Image: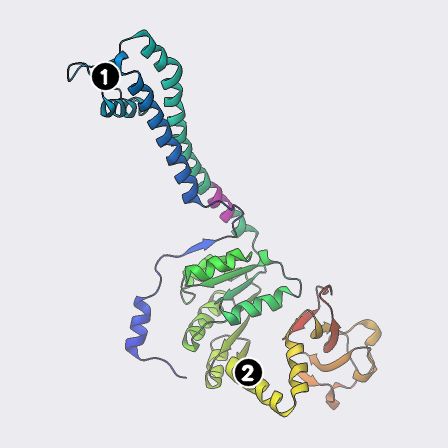
Amino acid sequence: MKLPGQDAIARQADERIVTHRVKLPRRTVQRPWRQVARRVVMALLCLVATALIVYFDHDGYTDNSDGGAVDLLDAFYYATVTLSTTGYGDITPVSDAARLTNIFVITPLRVLFLIILVGTTLEVLTERTREEWRLNRWRTALREHTVVIGFGTKGRSAIQTVCATGLKKEQVVVVDPSTKVVDAATADGYAGVVGDATRSDVLLRAEVQKARQIIIATQRDDTAVLVALTARQLNRGAKIVAAVREEENAPLLRQSGADVVITSASAAGRLLGLSVLSPSAGMVLEDLIQQGSGLDIVERPVVKAEVGRGVRETDDLVVSVVRGHRVLGYDDPAIGKLQLTDRLITIVRATPNTQVAPDTKRLT
């Protein structure tokens, strides 16, 4: 396997993200900084309005510190200490009009000013509490989900294919070290975890120990091996599917715990070669790996009416038969008659509205 040298590994360890967090799909459209900015503007408007009211009636106020004259700066000073309930007492209203203005105008402005400040603080605390409660509820309810490590082109295409079979977006958790990538995943409706997937604490935040299947679509083969080792250690029963760039790294990834390893570069190269030899065959194969329309490859159980029949006697176009841990070709003499415990890999005509039964799987 082609691994980077010791210096590269040490550098990668230094660049690991120490802090990680879970991001759930957000339902609010307004951003928090806009809410805070709007409240700050409202508070400043209250302050300016109070200062102007005092300045226009400056003859009704006296300043005990400089001989009684109240100018614009004194008006803003008085508005500040009044709205903040500090009240030093050096500037005071002396006329009846100024005192009535304080009672009926400035006091309501003071209350409004405090409501804005306290309301912003309470909203922040409430939002944090609500988000923490939502996160705890999400962790409690999450079972038999799918964890996607890496949300690049491979990871995005893989999860779109799985969701085309009926998997809900609420049952998908994306793990990626990039905050922007996780933000894109949450915008699509998936839950996301920002962090290095080679770390067990990051995978635990994705509840990988309760996952049904794990898709590893990292950019580097050595990272995929470390992720597979960590994920298999945390979850012995999950189905792990991984992608590698170099075919020579596939055996090592299988030894690390991956059930299925796809060599992305070789697969693309074989499809290119097939398209050169037969463009029509290449189009058919590309149609097979695009789920939800055209032709789909589906794995389904044998129904009772098919037990005892031959492969060619079924209504569907059977490609292979899964018997135990063996995958037998449609023309393998060892198949004989179909058994109730067999599973058939068939090619079917699919439409976007096709519903998949719970015990039926589309394959890629």
Residue 40, compared with residue 4, is above or below; it is above
Q: Would residue 364 appear left or right of 201 to someone viewing this image?
A: right
Residue 172 shows which numbered tag?
A: none
Residue underneath mark 1:
91
Q: Is residue 216 visible?
A: no
Please, what secondary structure does the residue beneath circle 2 have? helix
Could you tell me what secondary structure mostly forms the magenta stretch? Answer: helix
Q: Residue at x 41, y 67 (%)?
A: 198
Given the image, on which type of amino acid does mark 1 rest?
Answer: Ile
Real-space Cα separation, disc 1 to disc 2, in angstroms: 80 Å
Q: Residue at x 71, y 69 (%)?
A: 360
Residue 261 place in picture, x, y as percent: 53, 78
Q: Quadrant of the C terminus?
A: bottom right
Residue 255 place in picture, x, y as percent: 48, 79
Foreground residue, 246 or 92? Answer: 92
Residue 139, compared with residue 282, is above or below; it is above
Foreground residue, 88 or 126? Answer: 88
Q: Which range of residues does the magenta coloring cover?
A: 130-136
Which quarter of the figure has residue 345? Answer: bottom right
Residue 93 place in picture, x, y as percent: 28, 12
Residue underneath mark 2:
268
Please, what secondary structure does the residue beneath circle 1 have? strand
Given the image, on which type of amino acid does mark 2 rest?
Answer: Ala
Q: Quadrant of the N terminus?
A: bottom left
